[in-house]
């Protein structure tokens, strides 16, 4: 996995960086819908995400397999909720994905993703829901 240290320092420039020592979450897709023919998430497919940096207000999450970095923030009204997003290349276009994850306790949570794909000529989108369990807890 490639980690952009410049990206981290820029994302947290005005706050003290708190490194979270590789807190891993395994998420399982529980529901998905897609307007795209070949792009989407498979039901029951699992993904591993690592929270690599966090402050009281910001968070960086990395998808373990792809190395995609998601940048986000902790909800100001409920610190058990984080909102995070990323843009990345997929199937000849760019995917922009926005996620909301809510921890139900220290080791479990659930979330939802809404995403949009475009190659400049065609576009489509979709969403999926997931559950997540912290690894090693």
Image (cartoon, rainbow, N blue to C red):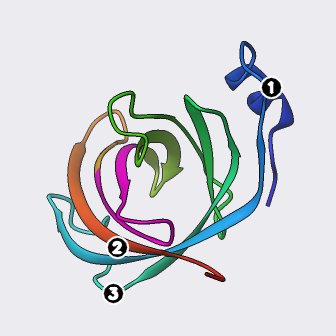
Q: In which quarter of the image is residue 54?
A: top right
- Residue 100 vs 78, above or below: the answer is below
Q: Position of residue 4 (x, y in %)?
A: 80, 39
Residue range of the region highlighted in magenta in the rendering: 97-113
Q: Name the residue under label 2.
A: 131
Of 4 and 101, which appears nearest the observer? 101
| SS at badge 1 | helix
Q: Report if residue 102 lies within the magenta region.
A: yes
| Picture layout, residue 12 above or below residue 54 | above
Residue at 42% over, 66% down: 105
Question: Which residue is farthest bottom?
Answer: 44
Mark earlier in primary sequence (2, 3): 3
- Distance from Cα at disc 3 to Cα at disc 1: 35 Å
Estimate the x, y position of residue 130 in percent, counting from the top left: 32, 70
For label 3, the SS is loop
- The residue wearing badge 3 is 44
Secondary structure mainly formed by the magenta segment: strand
Looking at the image, which is closer to me, 80 or 42?
80
């Amino acid at each position: 996995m490639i980690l952009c240290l410049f990206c981290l320092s820029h994302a947290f420039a005005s706050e003290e960086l708190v490194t979270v020592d590789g807190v891993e979450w395994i998420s399982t897709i529980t529901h998905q819908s897609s307007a795209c023919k070949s792009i989407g998430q498979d039901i029951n497919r699992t993904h591993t995400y690592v929270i690599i940096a966090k402050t009281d207000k910001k968070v960086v999450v990395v998808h373990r397999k792809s190395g995609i970095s998601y940048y986000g923030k902790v909800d100001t009204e409920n610190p058990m909720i984080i909102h995070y997003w990323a843009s990345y290349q997929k199937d000849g276009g760019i995917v922009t994905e926005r996620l909301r994850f809510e921890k139900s306790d220290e080791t479990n949570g659930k979330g939802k993703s809404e995403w949009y794909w475009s190659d400049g000529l065609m576009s489509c989108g979709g969403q999926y829901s997931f559950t997540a369990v912290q690894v090693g807890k």
